[in-house]
Amino acid sequence: MDASSQFQDTLPITSDALLAQLQGWGLDYMLHEHVPLRTVEDAKSVEDAMEVPGEAAFRVKNLYLRDKKKRNYLVTLEQDREIDLKALGAQLGVGGLSFGSPDRLMQTLGVRPGAVTPLAMINGAQNNVRFLIDAAVKGADRIYMHPLVNDRTVAMDVADLWGFFDRVGVSAEVLEVS
């Protein structure tokens, strides 16, 4: 199965249910539908169609990681940010950071590879996933991310993202990446 909305009914929480919940909480977003995006390069091919002139946009890439003690992490970075997992592990005081398996990703965040997103913390919070976000988000007006599937992108005010985290019980850690 791929990570598109065609298969959203196989997820613990569907993209449609997530979007309805965001609306119910009064968290505004703009929904964009597009071809499935699997990589940052794929995402860059559709960004112009979503562009809002004069907006400070935070476009993301997301890493689902595990450490040697099998603790789970979701790290959201600015899409062009380079990261050294060994250095990140040292910064976090954990060892052996590596990418988690697709099966573990589904178990902990309720998404498939290609659709990893900060919004997956609606599942990750109850599964003890530690969430870290690039400090570059502080300079942004809006964040662009998948709503649990990779053929949709939501543009949301960064303040509303923090409101989402409050609603799902996530303590987001701001990560200074050099």
Image (tube, rainbow, N blue to C red):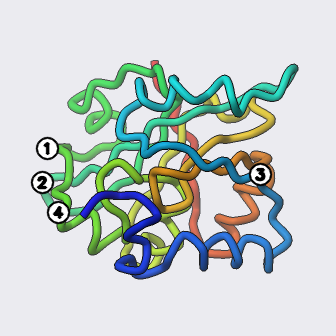
Which disc number belongs to residue 30?
A: 3
Determine which of the numbered discs, if any, sits on residue 70 in the image. Answer: 4
Which residue is located at x 43 percent, y 72 percent? 8
Mark found first going from the N terminus, 1 or 4: 4
Q: Which residue is mark 2?
A: 68
Residues marked 2 and 1 touching at CB (< 8 Å): yes
> Which badge, 1 or 3, comes first in the chain's sequence?
3
The amino acid sitting under disc 1 is Gly
Q: Specify few, some or many for label 2: CA neighbours under 10 Å numbering under 14, 14-19, or 20 or more.
A: few
Q: Where is 102 relative to 138, above or below?
A: below
Distance between the Cα atoms at labels 3 and 4? Answer: 36 Å
Evaluate if marks 2 and 4 touch, with contact meaning CB atoms under 8 Å apart.
yes
In the rendered structure, which amino acid carries the disc numbered 4? Lys
Name the element at disc 1: loop
- Tell me the element at label 2: loop
Q: How many marks?
A: 4
Picture layout, residue 143 above or below residue 84: below
In the drawing, what numbered circle is on residue 96?
A: 1
Vertical relation: 53 (above or below) 104: above
Q: Where residue 177 sits: x, y (%)?
A: 47, 25
Can you give x and y, in whole percent of width and height, for residue 143 in the image?
68, 41
Locate the C terminus and report the quarter of the image it occupies.
Answer: top left
Query: Is label 3 in a helix, a strand or a loop?
Result: strand
CA–CA distance between discs 1 and 4?
A: 9 Å
Q: How far is mark 2 from mark 1, CA to CA?
A: 5 Å
Residue 135 against residue 124 in the figure, above or below:
above
